[in-house]
Image (cartoon, grey):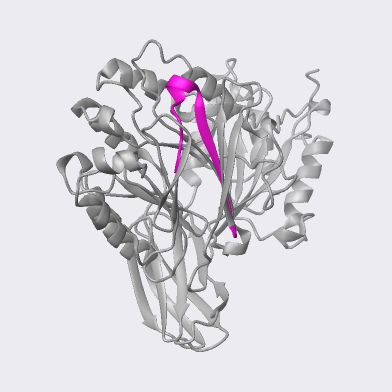
Amino acid sequence: MNSPYKRCSLFSFILASGLFTGAFAADRKIVFALSSDQHYGIPSYTNNPAVVQGIWNLPLVWTNWGPAWTNQTLDNLRGIVCLGDVVNHPHPSYWNLYSQVYTDMRDGGQMPCTVYDGYENHDLGSSIWTNMAARNAQLKNVRLSPNNACYSWDWQDVHFIQLNLYPGTNADCRGSYAFLTNDLATCVGKTGRPVVLFHHYGFSPNLLTVDWPTNSVPLYADAISNYNIAAIFSGHTHHNQRYQFGTITNYVTGSAGEFGKFSVVMIDNTNIVFRSLNATMTNPILYTWTNTITPPIEPVFMASTDKKTGQSVSVTGTLNTAATTINWSNSLNGTSGKIPASVNWTITNIPLQIGENQLVFSAMSSDREPLISELSVPTRSINWFAVSDTHFNPPVGREYLFPYNKAVIRAINNLAGKAYPNASWGTVPTPRGVTHTGDCTDGGSAGSWAAFNDAYGVNGFGMVPYPVYEGYGNHDTYRADPATDAPVNISLRNAMRRNI
């Protein structure tokens, strides 16, 4: 019905905060998928579509993860990490087959979440390498190598590093060993927080003698020897396998294209659970393997913010005992620093990079006691009220305040300072203004706009005491009198606005 007395204006309260949130290891719950050896371009490898469907079906497949997550449902995937050989030959058409599937559906692909690419021995052609490096550069919240080949990121307090073929120094590795050593020193340091590594070649006895160059294995072992490596994930053999690299477990994911295999990994504060699956089978679960995670050496506090490039933050904290130093690092842009510690300490002007930055704070004393008890940071708080579809249309003169419009104006005027129904929001702050997303009037006549101006004045001079920022909708045009059409009226109001 079109009667103005039946209309109800949409009114909502919007709070946008760029605040820091902390996450300790005890809160850790990370789930991601692994896919490897798709080999797009081999006609007989027909099982890639089954893997896609299997990944989409994951929340429905099982609920029992073993001792750590018994009878708990599977969380949403944080991402899908690919372990290489995505194509069989470096031909652009094969890359197109892969990228059309292994892309987040929000960006036009077929996957339910972000895809983290890795290139390997079948992907080394120049066009594939160029395409993959370009995709890496579009990833959010990652730290890239100078050539965009390798990258790292954090999920909660766990640090992840994509090393592609293997961490080596030859041309095919494209700086992976140098990136590994620099990234570990910069982003992990002495915190002892868990690290997960991805690369194509694993540690089967055959691969160690055939595919790994002679000096690369001891070089790799030495580079990671002082870090808490929780697991290494690889592909290449097309079969689900498990090996040991010293004390580190190497989990191998089978071929998606040839066999329809993929894996899912769960990490909590005590365990890594690796579950291998075959998407072509009625009961897809093949194996479930578990190993424990060493807790961080230092107490670590993770914090994140959505402030953008060019901004910085100052952080204050309280220690429950004096420490020798307070260390901080931002894994997204590689910045880090330290200050002498005291019971009450402050780190100022930490630089930020675009995206959701993740900061790591840790403290160390001679006896390695837990030190961080509280962390607080400045927060950004931007809030406003939003309305839409007021449809002012005075039947006589300016008798325009339909009952619902009256109620909305009364709520806007009385809401600031009131307790929000959800206790976590606290009280409603005074808004910066009111946004109106169109259909201010119900016909755009001169009387309709006069009524709207009386109620929603530009700079807080109407019945609503806050600045109003409106756009016009389809009901705001008045073809019978172009002089009162929406663009004319809104242009007049725009000319009176402040601070634009």
Q: Is residue 318 above or below residue 179?
A: below
Residue 255 painted magenta: yes
Magenta region, residue range:
251-270
Q: Is residue 442 above or below residue 435?
A: above
Q: Is residue 236 left or right of residue 295?
A: left
- Image quadrant of residue 172? top left
Query: Quick check: can you spot residue 452?
Result: yes
Q: Nearer the viewer, residue 66 or 338?
A: 66
Q: Is residue 295 above or below residue 279?
A: below
Count of picture labels? 0
Q: Is residue 495 above or below residue 230?
A: above
Q: Quadrant of residue 147?
A: top left
Q: Position of residue 271 (x, y in %)?
A: 58, 55
- Which residue is found at the position 43% from the left and 20% from the top? 258
Find the residue positioned furthest to the left: 171
Toward the viewer: 495 or 235?
235
| Residue 61 quadrant | top right
Name, please, the residue furthest toward the top.
43
Left or right for 484, reference 71: left
On the rendered image, what quadrant is the N terminus found in? top right
- Residue at image position (37%, 36%) is 117
Residue 330 shown left or right of residue 431 in the figure: left
Residue 149 visible in the picture: no
Q: Position of residue 42 (x, y in %)?
A: 35, 14
